[in-house]
């Protein structure tokens, strides 16, 4: 199908099982936006998993390890500040 010009970017999870289960989201997005380019920003270790998902067109690897963001430990008690 021709590219619709839409570009979608998903921030991928940092756990192996969650990344595998995210494929259903990628499938849904590709069905809802046929022809769109789907990119996933995720830890570099996930590249072998994402390369096996035909729905993912681009991988933007993050140079961070699991549970680390800019050298800071994860914070507890995160809150949603706007409706999803």
Image: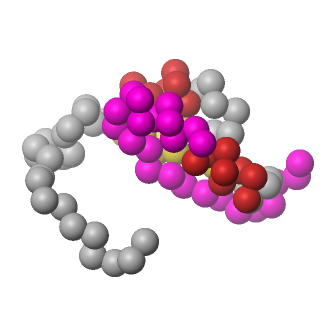
Residue 44 image point, x, y percent: 40, 30
Chosen colour scheme: secondary structure
Q: Residue furthest right?
A: 1
Residue 78, image quadrant: bottom left
Image quarter for residue 26? top right
The stretch drawn in magenta includes residue 21: yes
Looking at the image, residue 15 sits to the left or right of residue 26; the answer is left
> Going 41% across and 29% down the picture, which residue do you hit?
17
Q: Position of residue 21 (x, y in %)?
A: 50, 36
Q: Position of residue 18 (x, y in %)?
A: 42, 36
Q: Which residue appears at 61% of the width and 57% of the height? A: 8
Please state which of residues 43 and 30 is positioned toward the viewer in this rendering.
Answer: 30
Horizontal side of 45 relative to 54 (left or right) equals left
Number of disc labels: 0
Looking at this rendering, what residue extends furthest in the top direction? 48
Q: Which residues are magenta?
A: 1-24
The residue under the point 89% across, 48% down is 1
Q: Position of residue 68 (x, y in %)?
A: 19, 39
Q: In this orientation, which residue lies closer to the viewer: 68 or 70? A: 68
Q: Quadrant of the C terminus?
A: bottom left
Residue in the picture at 44% in, 50% down: 11
Q: Is residue 78 magenta?
A: no
- Is residue 77 or residue 69 the one in the foreground? 77
Inspect this view and state whether residue 58 appears: no
**In the rendered image, the vertical position of residue 69 relative to residue 53, given as above or below:** below
Q: Front-most of 18 and 67?
A: 18
């Amino acid at each position: 199908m021709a590219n619709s010009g839409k570009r979608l970017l998903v921030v991928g999870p940092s756990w192996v099982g969650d990344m595998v289960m995210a494929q259903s989201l990628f499938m849904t997005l590709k069905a809802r936006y046929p022809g769109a380019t789907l990119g996933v920003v995720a830890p570099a270790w996930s590249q072998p998993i994402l390369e096996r998902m035909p729905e993912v067109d681009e991988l933007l690897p993050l140079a961070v390890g699991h549970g680390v963001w800019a050298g800071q430990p994860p914070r507890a008690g995160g809150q949603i500040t706007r409706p999803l």
